[in-house]
Image (spheres, rainbow, N blue to C red):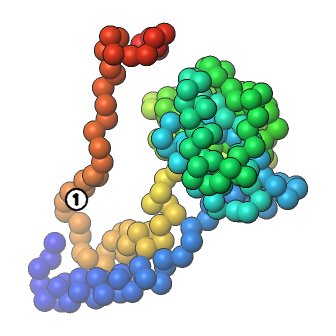
Amino acid sequence: MNSSESSLTTRREFLKTSSTMAIAGAIAAPHILSSARAASPGDTLKVGLIGCGGRGTGAAAQAMKADSNVELFAVGDVFEKAAKGAIKSVAAEAGADKVKVKPENTFVGLDAYRKVIDSGVDVVILATPPGFRPVHLRAAVEAGKHIFCEKPMATDAPGVRSVIESVRIAKERKLAVVAGFCWRYDYPLRELFKRIHDGEIGQVRAIYGTYLTGPVKPMPPASSRPEGITDL
């Protein structure tokens, strides 16, 4: 970067104005429920959860607390224990009155996503491992459902192209599709990125990025898995 006094002054101004913008921009981000409500008839939105791991369960609980007229109506996972555990967790966090999942709307298996989509829900939360996401997204769009799609949306080029096409179709059908790209809904960060792209700190010559998170656990050996759990 240019180290002249004028550039240093510009960078000081950048930090000052960006800090002000961060405070002014700290407003509630748009979310799937407001978008879906605008496009769906009826007072209560029925939510279907596809993928009952930690991220899916957390997203479902957040959805239940985001609006007074929303209920968890169906869940689906490859494993029964995960599906039933998600129901209990969401009820404990968001309130039992928000969870209306009957046994017949608790689906298990690799085809559980289709059963959730076909169960009468208005909105689906897609939170399985990302390799499945393109197929699940397309199925939800074709069924006319509003969608919260967690990131990553795909794991390879064909999957990415499929996601792009699914979103195009969703726009044509006026379906709400909200992504799990959290920075997209962070107004202070969006303003920060814009100012950097506009050159307010000079020419960027190098970037160092880091993401602090827990380690991804490897697949446990067969000897430590519950009975009946295969590599698949």
Location of residue 232 in the rendering, given as x and y in whole percent from the top left corner: 46, 14
In which quadrant of the rendered image does the N terminus lie? bottom left
* Circle count: 1
Residue 29 in the figure: left or right of residue 201: right
Q: Identify the residue at horizontal 71%, vertical 52% (top origin).
A: 98
Closer to the camera in the image, 37 or 6: 37
Closer-to-camera residue (24/60): 60
Considering only vertical position in the picture, is 71 above or below 120? below
Q: Is residue 165 visible?
A: no
| Residue 11 in the figure: left or right of residue 161 | left
Horizontal and vertical percent position of residue 224: 33, 16
Q: Which residue is mark 1?
A: 207
Q: Nearer the viewer, residue 116 or 221?
A: 221
Please rate how many residues cluster around mark 1, counting C-alpha atoms within 10 Å: few if below 14, some from 14 to 19, many from 20.
Answer: few
Which element is circle 1 on?
Answer: loop
Q: Position of residue 46 (x, y in %)?
A: 77, 47
Quick check: 64 left or right of 119? left
Residue ranking furthest to the right: 42
Q: Residue at x 45, y 60 (%)?
A: 183
Amino acid on which the number 1 mark rests in the picture: Ile
Say which quarter of the image contains residue 57: top right
Q: Left of 20 or right of it: where is 99?
A: right
Whether residue 75 can be seen here: yes
Residue at the image point whose x is 24% and y is 75% from the top: 202
Which residue is pictured at 35% across the width and 87% down the height? 17
